[in-house]
Every structure is written in C-alpha cells, then in structure tokens.
C-alpha cells in the first residue's frame, strides 16, 4: 500500500508542478488521505519534475549558453538571470522574515478560486492586444516577483502566476510566456530544492527515510512531469487556459465545502 501511495504522490506532483493548478495545494490535500510525507520526500519529487523540464528544454539551454555572444541570446539570457536574481533575493528575505501562510485546506481553496478568476480575467485582458514573442525587461522583473508571491501563498501556482503576469505585462503569447517562465523556473526550483534539502538534512538528517520509496517517487514524478509539460506546450499553441481556470474554481469550491463540513483540515 505504501508503494501505491508514493506512486500516486509522484503522479500528482508530476502533473501539477508545471500546470497552472498548484502542485503544493494538491500535495497538501493529497497527504491528508495518503499520509503526510517528510520534507525530504517532497523535495525529491519536486526535483524529479524539475529534471523533466530540464530535459525538455536542454537544447534551448545549450543554445543560450553556447551562443551567448549573439545579441538575441544574450538579451534573453540576461533577462532570465535578472528574473532569477529577483526571485532569489526576495525569496531569501521572505525566508528570513519567516512569512508563510498556514498550509491547510481553506487558504488553499481560496487561492485556487481567486487564481481561477484571475486567469480568466488576465487572459481576456492580454488578448486585447496583438501577441508578441518578445520578452521585455518589465516582464522579466515581474516574473521574478511573481515567483516569490506564488511561493508564499500555497495554492497560487508558480507557473500560473508567472505565465499570466508575463502575458499581462507585455502582451506576450501563451507559448512565449510559458517558455520564459519554465526556463526561469529551472534554476529557481533547483536552488530552492537544494536550499531546502540542505536545511532539512542539517536539522533532521536522513534517519527513517526509505530510499527505495524516494527513488520510485522521483522516477514517477520525472516521467509524469515530462509527459504533462510536453502536452501543455502542445495544448496552449491553439487553446486558452480557461479549462485550468474552471478546474481551479471547481476544486476550490469543493475543498471549501469539505473544510466547512469538517471532512478535511
């Protein structure tokens, strides 16, 4: 049964990490039925999802690194670096201040609902102007800030917040916004995972960890995230994000009802 539970958690992480529906929110709720996991476990399955996106974008990353001398690549790479730098600095400040919302169903449900309506409104507003594939400095700065906001509020969705900020700030097309935010997310999430892992190992060690279960969850998360992101990149070429917004609103309403009924905490 334990193997089934970790496989399910790996699947949930793989599907939800980069879809705009909040992986943190889904995992917090799922753990109420599948059993709470250690911080190390959660870091490991997130690392699997990051690896999947790294594999998907490895050609783009190599192009930016090896052809940095080209003006268009240098400009794009510098904007990625600035966005990551803003996230890193603000993220450390937030960590030092100890600001974090309670990770229970009610705030997550409200974040899902509000985020759903925000997505519908944001895409409608962004759609009024001709879409562009160019990423402006304003977009880079706001994406960096949005990543921190999403990290503070469980249920917000890092990918959702950053993609729609990019679309609103520069009328960026869905595909261009998704690529930029995913590329920014790679170093951001690696750094956050490494920071969290070192802190966890320092405070708690690895006693009691089942490395077989960790390995299974990591592999499952990697494979599922790879499939989910490839599907998403294809889907948004000709479709809006409306289906994800509706899903968030419905799920949030269900979670609120269950929380008020005392079925979940």
Image (cartoon, rainbow, N blue to C red):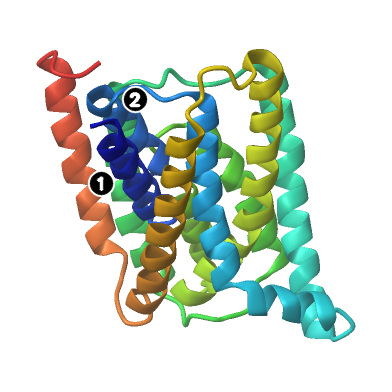
Number of other residues with Cα within 10 Å of mark 2, as a class: few under 14, some 14 to 19, many 20 or more? many
Decide if residue 136 is on the left or right side of residue 109: right
Q: Which residue is mark 1?
A: 248
Q: Is residue 173 visible?
A: no
The residue shown at (37%, 45%) is 10
The answer to whether 86 is drawn above or below residue 234 in the figure is above
- Quarter of image, res 137: bottom right
Q: State which tag comes first along the sequence, 2 or 1.
A: 2
The residue closer to the viewer here, 63 or 72, is 63
Query: Is the C terminus in the top left, top right, bottom left or bottom right quadrant?
Result: top left
Outermost residue to the bottom: 70
Q: Position of residue 74 (x, y in %)?
A: 83, 76
Q: Which residue is mark 2?
A: 107
The residue closer to the viewer here, 86 or 217, is 217
Q: Total label count?
A: 2
Q: State the separation of the CA atoms marked 2 and 1.
A: 13 Å
Decide if residue 147 is on the left or right side of residue 3: right
Outermost residue to the front: 212
The answer to whether 46 is drawn above or below residue 176 in the figure is above
The residue shown at (26%, 39%) is 4
Number of other residues with Cα within 10 Å of mark 1, as a class: few under 14, some 14 to 19, many 20 or more? many
- Quarter of image, res 89: top right
> Which numbered disc covers residue 38?
none
Q: Position of residue 252 (x, y in %)?
A: 22, 36
Query: Is the N terminus in the top left, top right, bottom left or bottom right quadrant?
Result: top left
The residue shown at (44%, 65%) is 226
Q: Secondary structure at mark 1?
A: helix
The residue shown at (66%, 47%) is 190
Q: Position of residue 128 (x, y in %)?
A: 40, 74
Q: Secondary structure at mark 2?
A: helix
């Amino acid at each position: 049964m334990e193997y089934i539970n970790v496989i399910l958690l790996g699947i949930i992480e793989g599907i939800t990490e980069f879809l705009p529906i909040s992986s943190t929110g889904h995992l917090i709720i799922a753990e109420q039925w599948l059993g709470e996991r250690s911080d190390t476990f959660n870091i490991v399955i997130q690392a699997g999802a990051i690896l999947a996106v790294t594999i998907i974008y490895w050609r783009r990353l190599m192009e930016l690194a090896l052809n940095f001398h080209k003006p268009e690549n240098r400009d794009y790479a510098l904007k990625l670096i600035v966005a990551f730098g803003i996230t890193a600095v603000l993220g450390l400040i937030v960590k030092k201040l100890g600001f974090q919302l309670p990770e229970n169903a009610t705030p997550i449900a409200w974040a899902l609902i509000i985020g759903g309506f925000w997505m519908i409104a944001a895409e409608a507003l962004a759609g009024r102007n001709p879409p562009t594939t160019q990423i402006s400095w304003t977009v880079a700065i706001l994406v960096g800030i949005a990543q921190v906001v999403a990290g503070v509020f469980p249920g917000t969705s890092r990918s959702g917040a950053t993609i729609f900020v990019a679309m609103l700030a520069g009328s960026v097309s869905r595909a261009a916004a998704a690529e930029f935010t995913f590329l920014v997310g790679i170093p951001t999430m690696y750094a956050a995972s490494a920071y969290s892992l070192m802190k966890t190992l320092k405070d708690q060690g690895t006693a009691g960890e089942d490395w077989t279960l960790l390995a299974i969850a990591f592999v499952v998360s990697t494979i599922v995230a790879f499939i989910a992101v490839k599907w998403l990149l294809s889907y948004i070429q000709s479709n809006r994000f409306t289906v994800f917004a509706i899903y968030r609103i419905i799920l949030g309403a269900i979670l609120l009802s269950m929380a008020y009924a005392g079925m979940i905490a």
